[in-house]
Amino acid sequence: MIPPVPYYFSYYYRYFENGNLQFSGKIGGFKSGIAIGKWKYFDETGKLTEVDEDKKFGLWDFDKVLSVLDKDGVINLKTGKNREFEKLQFFFDKDKKEWKIKIFKKNISVLVEEYWEYLFDGNTGKYTRDWYERYNKNAEKDMNLPPLKNSRANKNKQ
């Protein structure tokens, strides 16, 4: 379930076949599958177990990440700017304790857009931000497009 603007998370509920709640909690962003905050898990008898999913993030929990993105102006926690899945994508590597966030910046042409990419290191507390170009959904049908000069792959080679 997706709450109204300006929230940047969704709620997730799963039920047993008998209709009783199996578990519930929040997902960071929309479609990321990254559990955030406190989750409630129930066994078939109704016994509750709570899990603090934020512990896995180390020094960067979801709210701290959102705070930086808001401060940088790439999202707006009051208006919901860029909250759509197509514009804001969250990834988390549990082994590295590292968030990767991609945020739409602007359209350059009908086929190309710029985006911000943030990396938040949950071990050190540091983060980086860079921008790249990528083909958008309008370019999906044309497989013969040349590599973009400022694509992530090309910028990393420079």
Image (cartoon, rainbow, N blue to C red):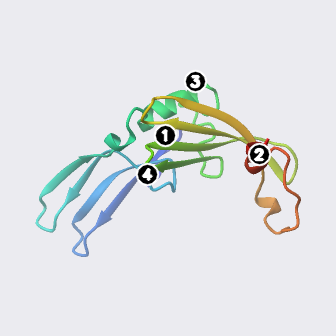
Q: Is residue 117 left or right of residue 16?
A: right
Q: Who comes first in sequence, dot 4 or dot 2?
A: 4
Label 2 sits on residue? 157
Give the alpha-carbon distance from disc 1 to disc 3, as whole Å. Answer: 16 Å
Give the alpha-carbon distance from disc 4 to disc 2, as whole Å. Answer: 30 Å
Local packing at callout 2 (Cα closer than 10 Å; few below 14, some 14-19, many 20+) is few
Q: Who comes first in sequence, dot 1 or dot 2?
A: 1
Disc count in the image? 4
The disc at residue 7 is 1
Label 4 sits on residue? 34
- Spot the residue most to the front: 157
**Residue positioned 34% across, 59% down in the render:** 13
Local packing at callout 4 (Cα closer than 10 Å; few below 14, some 14-19, many 20+) is some
In the rendered image, the quadrant that contains the C terminus is: top right
**Are the two marked residues, 2 and 3, in contact with CB atoms closer than 8 angstroms?**
no
The one nearer the camera, 129 or 106, is 129
SS class of the residue under badge 1? loop
Give the alpha-carbon distance from disc 2 to disc 3, as whole Å. Answer: 30 Å
Q: Is residue 54 left or right of residue 5?
A: left
The one nearer the camera, 62 or 79, is 62
- Kind of residue at disc 3: Lys
SS class of the residue under badge 4? loop
- Kind of residue at disc 2: Lys
Give the alpha-carbon distance from disc 1 to disc 2, as whole Å. Answer: 37 Å
Label 3 sits on residue? 71
Q: Who comes first in sequence, dot 4 or dot 3?
A: 4
* Spot occupied by residue 84 in the image (x, y as percentages of width and height): 60, 48
**Residue positioned 48% across, 42% down in the render:** 98
Local packing at callout 1 (Cα closer than 10 Å; few below 14, some 14-19, many 20+) is some
Residue 76 in sight here: no
SS class of the residue under badge 3? helix
